[in-house]
Amino acid sequence: MKLFVCVVDDARLLPHFLRHYGRFGVTEFHVAAPTDLRDSIARASRGHKVIQHHEFDAAASFTGGADAVTAMRDLAQDDEEWVVIVDLDEFVELREPLIDLVGRVEAEGANIARGVMYDRFALDGQLTAFDDDSNLSSLFPVRARFRQVVMGGNEIKGVLVKGRLKSLAAHHKFHDERPYSQILEISHYKWNDRALDRTRLARDMCLAANSPWDFDGEFKRVLDHYEQHGRFAWETFGGEIVGGGAPKSSKPGASWMRRFLAYASGARKVGINNY
């Protein structure tokens, strides 16, 4: 199965991304990126089939454009072929190989499976660095509907698409889509040590491009929230600490300290020291 993604200015998540989707059956990755990332992408791609495309404007994806992914799909996707379309920081929480999921989606007569984004945060809400060997789920153990509650954005995205359905509003909706009845979950590992710098960059790029992507101030709300609290105050927007198994639903207003102590106690038992 093929996957299509843009890498704009930071390829550090790529090793994690390739391992994650390779584990569930992606065998060919198509990556749109600027030429200055060519070598870093090549290093991260060892052991995986990664085809780099430098002729398309990957940076347009920062301002809501889907043109680079569409162009790659036009080159490499067959008319009836199922593919994965995600951003580099979007990790779909799959429970089975993709080929098995495709079988269930097709059995419903659907041509797209969509996911809902759960933003992931460090326990202390601070900007946190990671490396190739980090366990992202443990390093960012808090999940929340930040995009919906704070940013006021669209958190639903098409992630598994049959054929060349044309996108609407980035990849949130597609022309002639017949959605699968179940919504997948996406762990969104965006809020790491470079998050605020990249948010400012996205805001400035939208302004320069006169893009409608941030006309209602999504990026400003992120920056205002962090400035107000000095951290991502996940207890104020329904965050929850998640571990093994299927996460439970968020409950805004629950005690941050109670959940922290419960997590810390369990982490000590299994030797986790990320808190």
Image (tube, rainbow, N blue to C red):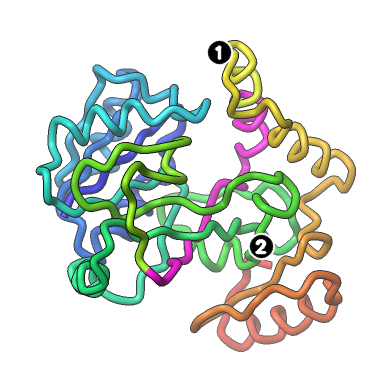
Q: On the picture, is 230 further left or further right than 133?
A: right
Q: On the picture, is 176 further left or further right than 79?
A: right
Pick the residue in front: 145 or 139.
145
Q: On the picture, is 10 further left or further right than 117?
A: left
Q: Position of residue 160 (x, y in %)?
A: 30, 55
Residue in the image at 25% along x and 21% along y: 54
Reply above or below: 3 against 6. below
Q: Which mark is residue 144?
A: 2
Q: Quadrant of the N terminus?
A: bottom left
Residue beneath label 1, please?
209
Pick the residue in front: 100 or 127.
100
Q: On the picture, is 146 further left or further right than 178?
A: right
Reply above or below: 178 against 259. above
Reply above or below: 61 against 135. above
SS state under label 2: strand
Pick the residue in front: 201 or 70.
70
Residue in the image at 14% along x and 41% along y: 77
Please tell me which of labels 1 and 2 falls first in the chain: 2
Q: Which quadrant of the view contains residue 51?
A: top left
Reply above or below: 173 against 42. below
Q: Residue furthest top?
A: 208
SS state under label 1: loop
Amino acid tagged 1:
Ala
Q: Position of residue 105 (x, y in %)?
A: 26, 69
Residue in the image at 65% along x and 57% along y: 121
Amino acid tagged 2:
Ala
In this picture, which residue range is highlighted in magenta? 181-201
Residue 189 is one of the magenta-drawn residues: yes
Q: Badge 2 local density, few (<14 within 10 Å), some, or many (20+)?
A: many
